[in-house]
Amino acid sequence: MQVRNLFRAVRPFISALAVIATAAVLIFTMYFTELGPQWIVFLAGILVAAILAEATRVSRAEWVSMRRTAQLAAVKEKLDRETQIRKRAEAAIAASKPRLYLIDEVLPTMVAFIDVEGKCQYHNRAFMKWLRLRPEQIHGRHMREVLGVKVYQETATAVRQSLDGHSVHYDRTQTMPDGAVYRLSVEHIPQFGEDGKVAGFHMLINDITSPGDVHMPGQSESKESAHAGSDADMHASVHDGKASQDMYADSLAEQVSGQKGVNRIKTAIEKGAFRLFCQLISPLTVGSGEAEHYEILVRLIEEEQKLIPPGAFFPLAEKFGLLLHLDRWVVQHVTEWASRQNLRDEKHKSSMYFINVSGATIGDSGFPEFLKLNLQEHGLPGAALCFEIPNSELALRASVVAEFARQVRQCGCRVAISGFGRDKILFDLIRGFQVEFFKIDGSIIFNILRDPVELAKITAINQVAKKIGVKTIAELVESEEAIAKLREIGIDYAQGFGISRPRPLAG
């Protein structure tokens, strides 16, 4: 290595000495020898070649120097930018320290962050005290170890939904080691990474047990009855827990958006900061003549044109009662856009546009009239729209869902049940109204190539759907192998990155 470095250092001087030596030989030959002209010309050519080689070397050295200088300037500029970003990040961290202290030390709500592998990567003091564990027994440990196998199994469905990007809320009871039984209100808030994928979820737990509800071993039934009337304490506890959740949600919203969540969502709706995308729903049967359909997706445009997925803003919109307004905004814009498409392109007349509706819209008695007027205004047939009703809403409010389906079908629209098969299959509840599509949940589709149980489940769903005249749509289809398997089963449609990525609803 030292010899190579030494040679690299003296190489320019060697080249210069070679040129000088060649010139000296030529001069000596011309004046002090009797060599013929041909030898003089030969030596002169060598001299010229040596001079050109030296000039080329010098020119290349200058070019390399200029390039390295430009690279150094670019690196310096990048370093300056990163320094500014680091300073802003440090300032933001310093500004958020009071909030972080509130969450870590003061907030009575138990908070933990669970990553996509199910491991706890963060917890506050309240969470640790409730579980009566040391920090090293929680951090980096799987939920199964932290909460216990029984609790983990009971909450597995909610965890899966959270990792699919959905906010989840449920109540459960917890039996402590001393035998005391408590009531807990649990909420899961998905956390999305910069790539838009779920990075994990925040688990918020509130103790909503009133003094009269705490059951200790050996307590008599009469003592439990004596405390049954303490509803005021229960409501106060629930209120305190909800206030803690709202405080955390507000803090989270401010960190994400820089302003209060309610103003942010309202401004986004009023100023058109939401953007509509569509994803192809393609028929799987070759030559069936079935039309292609599209699911409408909503994204929020942030600064620098970044797309915020629905799981990041839906909880805020739901909290402040704005989902109804957002659903109407989507229906209005899709109706207007679809009417223009039908006029321009004949093939779109047989296509349907699938629109997800929230629980607020399903229970809104004024929505069917709003839908009817929109369809009339833009001259769009109702058959162009298909409303997706979450399977969870069907399980909770079957009669309300049935009435909603009946009224939108009176406008000519179609109905689909989304997330079908994720939880209990509700074929009995569907008998009360007509539905055109089952959208089989992506968490099942994702595993059909490696889990025979999920494959059997999809096959059974498809067989029953065929008997009752309902078409099936597979969600989250991401490979040719999955498409081939779904086609073999007899699924009617497929949707996912293996079919088509979402694209802007433009034109």
Image: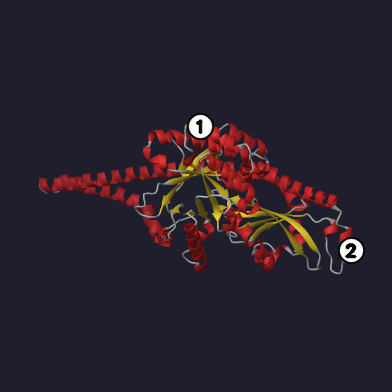
Q: Position of residue 193 (x, y in %)?
A: 57, 50
Instruction: Tell which tag, 2 or 1, sits nearer the viewer.
Output: 1
The answer to whether residue 440 of the structure is visible from this angle is yes
The number of numbered discs placed on residues in the rendered structure image is 2
Residue wearing tag 2: 222
| Disc 2 element | helix
Q: How is the image coloured?
A: secondary structure
Question: What amino acid does circle 1 point to?
Answer: Gln
Of 481 and 107, nearer the camera is 481
- In primary-sequence order, the first of circles 2 and 1 is 2
Q: Position of residue 276 (x, y in %)?
A: 51, 39
Q: Residue at x 78, y 68 (%)?
A: 177
Of 320 and 195, nearer the camera is 320
| Disc 1 element | helix
The answer to whether residue 500 of the structure is visible from this angle is no
466 in relation to 371, above or below: below
Question: What amino acid does circle 2 point to?
Answer: Ser
Q: Quadrant of residue 89?
A: top right
Residue wearing tag 1: 376
Q: Quadrant of residue 346?
A: top left
Q: Position of residue 119 (x, y in %)?
A: 63, 62
Q: Which residue is situated farthest in the top direction here?
A: 377
Q: How busy is the neighbourhood of tag 2: few (under 14 within 10 Å), some, or many (20 plus)?
A: few
Q: Residue at x 86, y 69 (%)?
A: 218
Does residue 257 appear left or right of residue 335 in this picture? right
On the rendered image, what quadrant is the N terminus found in?
bottom left
Q: How busy is the neighbourhood of tag 1: few (under 14 within 10 Å), some, or many (20 plus)?
A: few
Cα distance in 3D space between marks 2 and 1: 63 Å
On the rendered image, what quadrant is the C terminus found in?
top left
Q: Residue at x 59, y 57 (%)?
A: 428
Does residue 206 appear left or right of residue 409 in this picture? right
Of 452 and 245, nearer the camera is 452
